[in-house]
Amino acid sequence: MDNIRNFSIIAHIDHGKSTLSDRLIQATHIIPEREFKDQLLDTMEIERERGITIKSQTICLPYTAKDGRTYHLNLIDTPGHVDFTYEVSRALASCEGALLLIDASQGVEAQTLANLFLALEHDLEIIPVINKIDLPSADIERTRRQIEEDLGLDPQSAILASAKEGTGIDEVLEAIVTLLPPPAAETRRPLKALIFDSHYDAYRGTVVHLRVFEGRIRAGDIIQFMSNGAEYRVEEVGIFQVQRVPEKELHAGQVGYILAGIKTVSDTRCGDTVTHRSNPCDAAMPGFKAAKPVVFSSIYPVASDGYADLTAALEKLKLNDAALIYEKDSSVALGFGFRCGFLGLLHLEVVQERLEREYDLSLILTAPSVRYELTMADGSTMVIDNPALYPDPAQIQSAREPYIQASIIVPERYMGAVMQLCLDRRGSNKNYQYLTSDRLEMTFELPLAEVIYDFYDRLKSVTQGYGSFDYELIDFRETDLVKLDILINGERVDALSQLVHRERAVGRARQACERLRDEIPRQMFKVAIQGAIGGKIIARKTVSPFRKDVTAKCYGGDITRKRKLLEKQKKGKKRMKIVGKVMIPQSAFLAVLKSDKQ
């Protein structure tokens, strides 16, 4: 047990977490140099392109320290984005310590603080590491001051490293061995193991990633999941070393995997406790909660004959992504599709890109929405996330929408611009404090519906990329909710409907009408594009018709002849409008979703 160290690397996005993982793997020589590739633990193409970790990985690194002993270092990698905070918390619960990575040029940012507090909640030993010291813009002394003032950690204990150059990697490995405690575990007690992740293998079923806290687990054992009571016979146990390595058993303190013929990832819930059926442990590990989606959108195939392919693709994707939920949906304009729930906007983008790339699908997504709570006139409550299910406003007594607490860290010179942005989004400033003489942390309470639209893009724009953002859901609050309908040629297009706050309705309606006017092709008759709340029109744009010059043959003469021809043409256009149908191109649906670039 003394030779095991379980640790994680936590950091803000783009502070070099994956690069440091690569250097640690190279330093322990568990993979031949010719087989090595950058971002080794990021297995998805989209992770490599964006430089983010979406699906966390685990690896066991054998390391011979300066004292001559060989240690087993279990690196439990974590996703970096706020959407996956729950997965990060479960991974941290499986560790005894963490490397807190800080970019020497950027300094302490919003998720650096959020992840540190998450680690301290689990009583982890923290080792600060100042990364990217090779950059010309690196300011090591300023970063040390921030570590002391913002984080309350000892700045002199911070290890200076450059993961890209390979500098300081030996010091990091020695610090893991000497400063992090070994797991305090009891092998003689009943089995208690925490599931912190899982993924799907096409040949073996679900691979469950777990940390054993008490007892032992071997192939042939009958295990039970404590959240749903499901029972399975273990087929194989082992550890991760880039590839899965089977072992005879996993004992208390170890991190590894089990295979038990589990058909879907959704059966293995992140944060669940595994125990023996015949000799169960006394209580489950604390902190388990089911993943709850917060952003909702409908997905439709571009061509109606692509519905079967989309169904098959979602079923396969669900095997690897337990947080994705979906149900059948239909639209008059777009046909059959699925209503999907996501952990956040990044999760939505990732699912969309994976469906389009891995399964070669062309998709249309409706405007993202959040979940609203409605109190009806008869006293009953109703939860909706789809504009199509919005009831008659006369039956609604009150509506509530989810609010978040946003923590934004910015240089002082952008304070006014950020405050204006948040106030424009119906936010309220709760607190702000100076972290250093020129950097401050601002705390706002904002409606989640305003954040999912284009908030992050606008924040990056007004702060010139220096603003960092982290949030958590707090509660539901009263709101003045309305359903915004888009009418084209007098007909409602259900796929373009949105649930918005009454104050924002006119702006959203005008923006949608302008974008549609640019996208809908001209017809032989005038096409009216209108935004409406119930029967009240609040915005309108018109697509001008093609027009034949019927007066071209009139050379001079009386004006009444020209008027007669124009009136005749006008009647024909009116008759054509009654029978004419407007085909809405797919680009029009996508144009409405684009964030406001103004």
Image: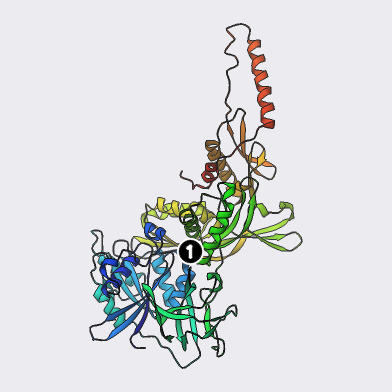
Q: Residue at x 63, y 7 (%)?
A: 558
Residue 428 on image: x %, y %: 52, 58
Q: How many marks?
A: 1
Residue 366 on image: x %, y %: 57, 50
Residue 139 on image: x %, y %: 26, 63
| Residue 134 as seen in the image, left or right of residue 523 | left
The type of colouring in the image is rainbow
Outermost residue toward the front? 203
Q: Name the residue under label 1.
A: 83
Viewer-proximal residue, 359 or 379? 359
Residue type highlighted by circle 1: Asp
Image: 412 above or below 273: above
Outermost residue toward the top? 557
| Residue 280 as seen in the image, left or right of residue 533 | left
Any part of residue 32 in sight? yes
Q: In which quarter of the image is residue 23?
A: bottom left
| Residue 82 as seen in the image, left or right of residue 73 | right
Any part of residue 497 in sight? no
Viewer-proximal residue, 24 or 555? 24
Q: Residue at x 53, y 40 (%)?
A: 515
| Residue 393 as seen in the image, left or right of residue 426 | right
Residue 141 on image: x %, y %: 25, 67
Outermost residue toward the bottom? 188
Q: The residue tagged with tag 1: helix, strand or loop?
A: helix
Callout 1: 10 Å neighbours few (<14), some, many (20+)?
A: many
> Which corner quadrant holds the N terminus?
bottom left
Q: In which quarter of the image is residue 115?
A: bottom left
